[in-house]
Amino acid sequence: MSETLLRDAVRRLAAAGIENPRLDARLLLEHAHGDNALFEALVCRRAAREPLAYITGRKEFWSLDFEVGPDVLIPRPESETVIEQALAAFPDRAAPLDVLDLGTGTGCLLVAFLKEFPNACGLGIDVSQKARAIAHRNVVRHGLAARGAIDGGDWSVAGSYDVILANPPYIETGDLAGLEPEGAYEPVLALDGGADGLSAYRAVVPVLAVLLRPGGRALLEIGAGQEGDVAAVLALSGLGVVRTAPDLAGIPRVLVAAHRG
């Protein structure tokens, strides 16, 4: 493949507003495996602002490789804060913890957690059948089928857990139209948090209060500026914020919650 073709791809991606056009062009080139026609088709898709992860079908999270597709939210670096805080909350990596991942999507949080805690067992649930299929393949891909299960459901599930992970949809409905063009390709179900961005928290927090064991921790990802509002929702169900953790940009991103008292 000629350098002229690559330079043209970089130019086109830059004109389309892609933040890192040279990097994206090289990744697409690698994915095309020398097929010029395929490379051209991939560049057209990226120039239309389809997310790179959906084009390649892969996304890295917690230094692990995950299958992704348009039926699941693309894992984001800020969500790694959830795993960082889980490690801080449970320093004993050998602990036989039971973990629940609500709205598992790709299964990235569940898989990353189980990789860090080799004696833990976990369940990821998702209302989307297509998302569950992707999550199951990611669990199997990482050799965790004996310790990680994927099942259907919304926020309702039976049992009790030491750790509950959740990254609910938290974008206000009115703000969806203002997202980057790539956002139009992601499932609305995983983004739309209702009129005030808190609908999913109001639904999930009462479930946390029932399922979380004494001494356990719930780790919730939140949107920018939602710290106080989500803390208030937690308080209504008898849960308190143990710690608030910022992401790499310094934005409060994860609330670590526990039963009060």
Image: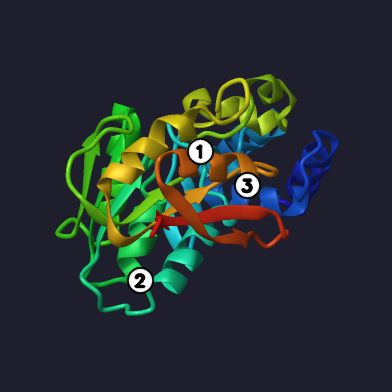
Please give the residue where the numbered disc 2 appears in the rendered image: 116
Residue type for callout 1: Val
Q: Position of residue 220 (x, y in %)?
A: 48, 49
What is the three-letter code of the residue carrying label 2? Glu
Q: Real-space Cα distance between discs 2 and 3?
A: 27 Å
Q: Earlier in the sequence, mark 2 or mark 1?
A: 2
Disc 2 to disc 1, C-alpha distance:
30 Å
| Mark 1 / mark 3, whichever is N-terminal | 3
Q: Give the residue at mark 3.
A: 227
| Residue at the spot of label 1 | 233
The picture quadrant where one finds residue 142 is bottom left
| Quarter of the image where the C terminus is located | bottom left
Q: Note whether residue 63 is visible.
A: no
Residue 109, relative to residue 226: is it above or below? below
Q: Nearer the viewer, mark 1 or mark 3?
A: 1
Q: Amino acid at mark 3?
A: Glu
Left-right relation of 100 to 247: left
Q: Residue at x 18, y 40 (%)?
A: 158
In what element is the residue under mark 3? helix
